[in-house]
Image (cartoon, rainbow, N blue to C red):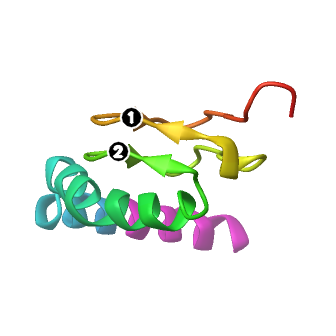
Amino acid sequence: MKHIFFIALQKITLAFARMWSKIFPYKMKCLVDEKFVFPFYTIWITRGIKSIGKNVIVRPKANLIHGVEYITIGDNTRFGANLYNSPHGM
């Protein structure tokens, strides 16, 4: 009985995912991230940085943790996922 329930649940989940992908395609998700999510994340994670330029984007999962008061970021800079940035010697 459990096996039938999980198969039905899997089919329902896949059907929902297919329907959702028609309503909210991947390209739209990328656009929403670029215009709304990344700028808010950038503001949140870069507070305390010594100096930050214009047009800087920090994507989620980038780490700017240790010694941010010594870090200077120039204009037109983008940081991606799994970045670990700290000043020399920290």
User: Is residue 24 or residue 17 the one in the foreground?
Assistant: 24
Q: Amino acid at mark 1?
A: Gly
Left or right for 76, reference 1? left
Q: In which quadrant is the N terminus drawn?
A: bottom right
Residue marked by disc 2: 53
Residue 47 on image: x %, y %: 55, 64
Left or right for 67, reference 8? right
User: Is residue 78 or residue 20 the one in the foreground?
Assistant: 78
Look at the picture and state if 66 lies above or below 39.
above
Q: Secondary structure of the magenta portion, mostly? A: helix
Q: Amino acid at mark 2?
A: Gly
Question: Real-space Cα distance between discs 1 and 2?
Answer: 5 Å
Residue 20 on image: x %, y %: 23, 66
Q: Residue furthest top?
A: 88
Mark 1, secondary structure of its residue: loop
Residue marked by disc 1: 74
Of label 1 and label 2, which has the lower sequence position?
2
Q: Are marks 1 and 2 in contact (CB under 8 Å)?
A: yes
Q: In which quadrant is the C terminus drawn?
A: top right
The magenta stretch spans which residues?
1-14
Q: Is residue 41 magenta?
A: no
Q: Residue at position x 35%, y 34% from top?
A: 77
Residue 25 on image: x %, y %: 16, 54
Q: Residue at position x 20%, y 60% from top?
A: 35
Left or right for 71, reference 43? right
Q: Residue furthest right?
A: 89
For residue 50, which numbered disc appears in the image? none
